Structure formats: C-alpha cells, structure tokens
Amino acid sequence: MSDTPVTKENTPSRGDAAMVPPVDVIEDASGITLYADLPGVPKDRLHLSVDSGSLTIAGDVVLPLAEGLESTRAEIDQPRYWRTFSLSRELDIDKVTAEFSDGVLTLRIPKTEQALPRKIEIKVA
C-alpha cells in the first residue's frame, strides 16, 4: 500500500464527494478479515490509515485511455473512494496486514491476546 498517510489535507471535505467502496467484513475467533472492492485504483494510489481507533481506506481511480483516444462519456462521477470504520479495542491494530490484487483489498486484523478465547484448566481438589 502507499506510504502516503491519510491526513486532513487529503481527506475529502463536505464539498468533495467520494464513492463508498463495497466492503465485506468476516469475523472469526481470531480476528476480522475485510474485503473492499476498489476497481480502477492502482496500488500506488491506495492509502490506508489506522488512527485513534478508526481505519480509513482511500483510493484514487485511474482509468487509462489508449494513446490517441479521448473519453466521450464517463460514468464514474467521483474519481475517488473513501471509507472509514471504527475499530473495536479487541482488535490489534499493530498487526494489520494488507494485500491488494485485481482491485480487491484484503485486510486482516487479528484480535488482541486478551480478546482471544482461551481454555481454562480445571484442577481436581
């Protein structure tokens, strides 16, 4: 993912519209996996940020045209994706992993050790 942090300077304001990427979130015993569809966003224009308990996904759409061609109609009104999620304190934000392939961002956020289920040993008295 890009090293450019998501900051107030590159955050869309109320006047700047952005598309909201569709996202699937799957939770299991060890954490969550988030799948975000970001068609048209190259890896170098994708920005991820975790700050103060929130996750932000931002990406700029780049639709290349073949040399000598000109676009006469574009149905993408907003050339940018933007979505923010609140994260539970049960999630370990220091261990987030991200993969990006074929326009799909996959994030894995594990639960903290304290939030993981554990077996309690029963002693015989």
Image: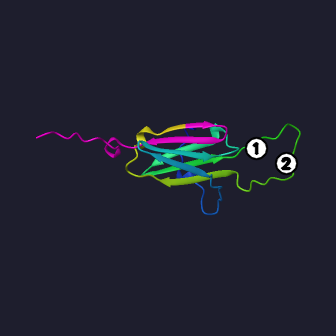
Residue furthest left as drawn: 125
* Residue drawn 65% across the image and 59% down it: 16
Q: Is residue 9 above or below residue 103?
A: below
Q: SS at mark 1?
A: loop
What are the residue bounds of the magenta stretch?
Answer: 99-125
Residue furthest right as drawn: 68
Closer to the camera in the image, 15 or 64 = 64
Residue 45 — which label? none
* Residue drawn 51% across the image and 47% down it: 26
Tell me, yes or no, whether the highlighted magenta stretch contains residue 118. yes
The residue carrying pointer 1 sits among few (fewer than 14), some (14 to 19) or many (20 or more) residues within 10 Å by Cα, namely few
Where residue 48 appears, x then y in whole percent?
54, 44
Residue identified by numbered label 2 = 71
Left or right: 117 as drawn, with respect to 3: left
- State which tag comes first along the sequence, 1 or 2: 1
Amino acid residing under circle 1: Leu
Tell me, yes or no, whether the highlighted magenta stretch contains residue 26. no
Q: Quadrant of residue 45?
A: top right
* Residue drawn 65% across the image and 56% down it: 18
Residue identified by numbered label 1 = 63
Where residue 114 appears, x then y in whole percent?
31, 44
Amino acid residing under circle 2: Ser
Dividing the image into 4 quarters, which one contains the N terminus?
top right
